[in-house]
């Protein structure tokens, strides 16, 4: 029989964690959101308030439903607050050490049958799972940015993930209005493995001054119908996140397509991380309004 999932823990309230919490609460699920400190909680809460405010302004959500959604999310700085969770989704920064520690602790806190899911975009679910006493109940559950808008979820199974765990997570993400795909544990899964070779190639065209950023982005928007061009998309994803994904995929595949273009590292070192830092390939007035420098 499928697991009853009505309370979900979300660990980490960065762009992805906050988006995931919003998606869950919009579906009527009680969310317990965990951040490392009060400042992190404040940023996560502000992100969710901003995103749902925009959804109301664009007629995607009514004001009453927004108030109910916000009331379904409680915040804490202690993982022990997740003792009653029916499922936990982790969305903390992409560090295996950090994730290993969080999963080991979650394993001691939640009930034995509870599924532990990671939103990692490129780290090995298998390597995360072995830090728990329940590797068969650990999966990848990868959302796409912006999570409230994009419908794909990648459900990642390892060689020991139990079939009913995969089935329950697939069913659960359908309940969220998502389109799940199921894949094995390989860096980049499906979408990032295909997408990041293309994004990296666009950065190398930009670096060699083969084309301007505007022309690169216009080509893919108007020539291929993509909703945004590759450099604008990298600004949305975050250059630091993109670099980590490329580096992990390159380490595993040795495919030159995934060898991070050097200018990416230089931009990150200079603090140009994309929208979240106000400047990446473009300069931003606020999180929603790109302006060209
Ligand atoms: N709740 C519900 N609906 C919302 C919403 C919310 N919080 N916020 C926005 N929406 C709706 C809008 O109302 C709009 O609906 P409409 O098309 O019916 O009018 C739609 O979602 C699009 O949103 P916006 O109006 O805010 O903005 P744009 O039309 O400019 O689209 C975009 C922005 C959704 C980011 C679009 O450009 C896009 O899809 N870009 C590609 C993003 C992409 O490729 N993401 C994947 C990145 S890779 C990744 O995430 C993997 C990770 O591991 C790195």
Image (cartoon, rainbow, N blue to C red):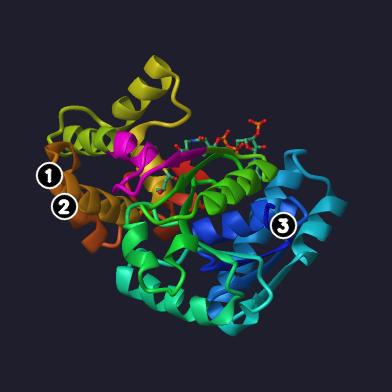
Looking at the rendered image, the disc whose residue lies closer to the viewer, 3 or 1, is 1
Residue furthest top as drawn: 223
Q: Residues within 10 Å of mark 2 (few under 14, many from 20)?
A: few
Task: State left or right for residue 143 relative to residue 69.
Answer: left
SS class, disc 2 = helix
Neighbours of disc 1 within 10 Å: few (<14), some (14-19), many (20+): few
Q: Quadrant of the C terminus?
A: top left
Q: As drawn, is 195 to the left or to the right of 107?
A: left
Instruction: Tell whether 72 sits left or right of 96.
Output: right
Please provide percent x and percent y for residue 67. Answer: 82, 59
Asked if the residues shown at circle 2 and circle 1 are in contact, with their CB atoms under 8 angstroms apart, the answer is yes
Residue ID for mark 3: 25
Q: Earlier in the sequence, mark 3 or mark 2?
A: 3
What label does residue 109 carry, if any? Answer: none
The label shown at residue 251 is 2
Query: What's the distance in space between the residues labelled 2 and 1, CA to CA?
Result: 6 Å
| Mark with earlier residue (3, 1) | 3
Q: Which residue is mark 1?
A: 254
Name the residue nearer the viewer: 66 or 182: 182
- In this rendering, the answer to whether 243 lies above or below 210 is below
Magenta part of the chain: 181-196
Q: Position of residue 250 (x, y in %)?
A: 17, 48
Quadrant of the image occupied by residue 88: bottom right
User: Is 270 located above or below residue 216 in the figure?
Assistant: below
């Amino acid at each position: 029989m499928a697991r009853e999932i009505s309370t979900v823990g979300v660990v980490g309230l960065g762009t992805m964690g906050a988006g995931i919490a919003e998606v869950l609460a919009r579906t009527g699920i009680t969310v317990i959101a965990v951040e490392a400190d009060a400042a992190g909680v404040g940023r996560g809460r502000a992100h969710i308030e901003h995103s749902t405010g925009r959804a109301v302004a664009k007629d995607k959500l009514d004001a009453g439903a927004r108030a109910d959604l916000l009331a379904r999310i409680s915040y804490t700085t202690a993982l022990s607050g997740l003792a009653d969770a029916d499922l936990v989704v982790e969305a903390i920064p992409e560090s295996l050490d950090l994730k290993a520690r969080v999963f080991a602790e979650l394993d001691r806190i939640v009930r034995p049958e509870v599924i532990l899911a990671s939103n990692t975009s490129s780290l090995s679910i298998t390597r995360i799972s072995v830090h728990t006493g329940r590797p068969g109940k650990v999966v990848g559950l990868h959302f796409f940015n912006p999570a409230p808008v994009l419908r794909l979820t990648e459900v990642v199974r390892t060689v020991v993930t139990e079939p009913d765990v995969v089935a329950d997570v697939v069913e659960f993400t359908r309940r969220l209005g998502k389109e799940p795909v199921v894949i094995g544990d390989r860096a980049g899964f499906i979408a990032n493995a295909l997408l990041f070779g293309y994004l990296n190639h666009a950065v190398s065209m930009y670096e060699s001054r083969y084309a301007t950023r505007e022309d690169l982005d216009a080509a893919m928007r108007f020539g291929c119908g993509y909703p945004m061009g590759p450099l604008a998309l990298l600004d949305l994803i975050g250059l630091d996140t993109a670099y980590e994904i490329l580096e992990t995929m390159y380490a595993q595949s040795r495919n030159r397509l995934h060898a991070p273009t050097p200018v990416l590292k230089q931009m990150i070192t200079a603090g140009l991380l994309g929208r979240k830092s106000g400047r990446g390939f473009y300069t931003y007035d606020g999180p929603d309004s790109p302006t060209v420098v």
